[in-house]
């Protein structure tokens, strides 16, 4: 399996605080069936600066070497969790080098938890094309909304998800929400999303070994129960498509 959302990179955000913690997180992922993980640190303005793609790539290379030396059979790939603010919209318009998932067209986005961004409906992203061959060829960014079940506006108005879907957004749900550890409200929402076919990817959003140990054991059965017939697609097929930069049909 592939974890598409993780804060396993050490010393770059509020995730793993050192390589020792990264190792513990990696061991837990492997124990629970994961073979690959996208490293997706937060990228947000802090004092006018942002974590660069070059810095993330450097950290991923360092972690990959560390895991190899430690004998941890977990492949790591570059990525980032971009906070969707006005600055990000401008970055996409002017082709700023973004750290997409393994250099693909897939970009992981985090929305404000409490406020609905007014610019999310702008034509920052190209509209979906009916021509599949053209869609596959053109280098359009494919935005993936991280943990939509956490956003207050989505909880209040689930129809927001369909609005985003119509604009071509994909959705990544956190495994702790699927297992019920994140609470009844989030579980109810992701259950509704699963029924409507609005879950495209899942991820741990792991920030620590303690956190991972709290919801990963036995997650597969719970995920399969909630996702039903789409379990294999969401858990395995779609993450592989992201890794290979192929189109996820929505």
Image (cartoon, grey):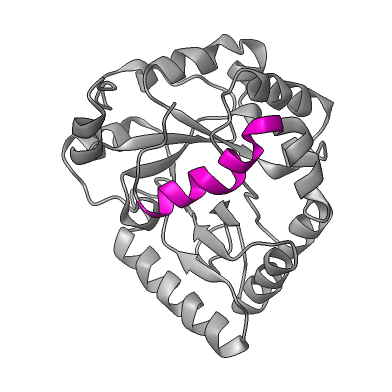
Examine the rendered structure and indicate whether residue 249 appears above or below residue 40. above
Q: Is residue 120 above or below residue 224?
A: above
In magenta, the rendered stretch is 228-244
Indicate yes or no whether the magenta region holds residue 113: no
> Which residue in the rendered view is the most extreme toward the bottom?
69
The residue sitting at the front extreme is 229
Q: Position of residue 78 (x, y in %)?
A: 41, 61
Residue 229 colored in magenta in the image: yes
Whether residue 94 is visible here, answered yes or no, is yes
Q: What is the tally of numbered marks visible in this picture?
A: 0
Q: Is 44 situated above or below 130?
A: below
Question: Which residue sits at x=74%, y=39%?
Answer: 224
Q: Main secondary structure of the magenta part?
A: helix
Task: Please provide percent x and percent y for residue 233.
Answer: 56, 40
Residue 80 can be seen in this image: no
Quarter that holds the C terminus:
top left
The quarter holding residue 185 reads top right
The residue depicted at 50 percent of the width and 58 percent of the height is: 38
- Which residue lies at the image location 19% right of the left edge and 40% below the top edge? 137
Residue 79: x and y, percent?
42, 55
């Amino acid at each position: 399996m592939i974890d598409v959302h993780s804060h396993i990179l050490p010393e770059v955000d509020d995730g793993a605080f050192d390589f020792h913690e990264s190792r513990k997180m990696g061991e837990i992922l492997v124990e629970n069936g994961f073979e690959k993980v996208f490293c997706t640190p937060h990228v947000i303005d802090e004092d006018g600066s942002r974590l660069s793609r070059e810095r993330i790539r450097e950290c991923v290379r360092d972690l990959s070497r560390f895991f190899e030396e430690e004998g941890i059979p977990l492949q790591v790939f570059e990525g980032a969790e971009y906070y969707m603010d006005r600055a990000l919209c401008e970055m996409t318009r002017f082709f700023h080098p973004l750290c997409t998932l393994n250099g693909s067209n897939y970009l992981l986005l985090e929305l404000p938890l409490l406020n609905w961004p007014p610019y999310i409906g702008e034509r920052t992203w190209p509209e979906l094309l009916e021509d599949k061959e053209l869609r596959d060829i053109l280098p359009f960014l494919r935005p993936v909304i991280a943990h939509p079940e956490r956003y207050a506006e989505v909880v209040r108005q689930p129809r927001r998800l369909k609005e985003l879907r119509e604009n071509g957004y994909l959705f990544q749900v956190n495994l702790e929400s699927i297992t019920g550890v994140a609470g009844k409200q989030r579980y109810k929402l992701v259950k509704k999303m699963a029924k409507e076919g609005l879950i495209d990817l899942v991820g741990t959003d792991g920030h620590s070994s303690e956190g991972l140990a709290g919801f990963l054991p036995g997650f597969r059965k719970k995920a399969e129960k909630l996702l039903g017939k789409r379990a294999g697609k969401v858990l395995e097929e779609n993450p592989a498509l992201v890794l290979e930069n192929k189109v996820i049909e929505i």
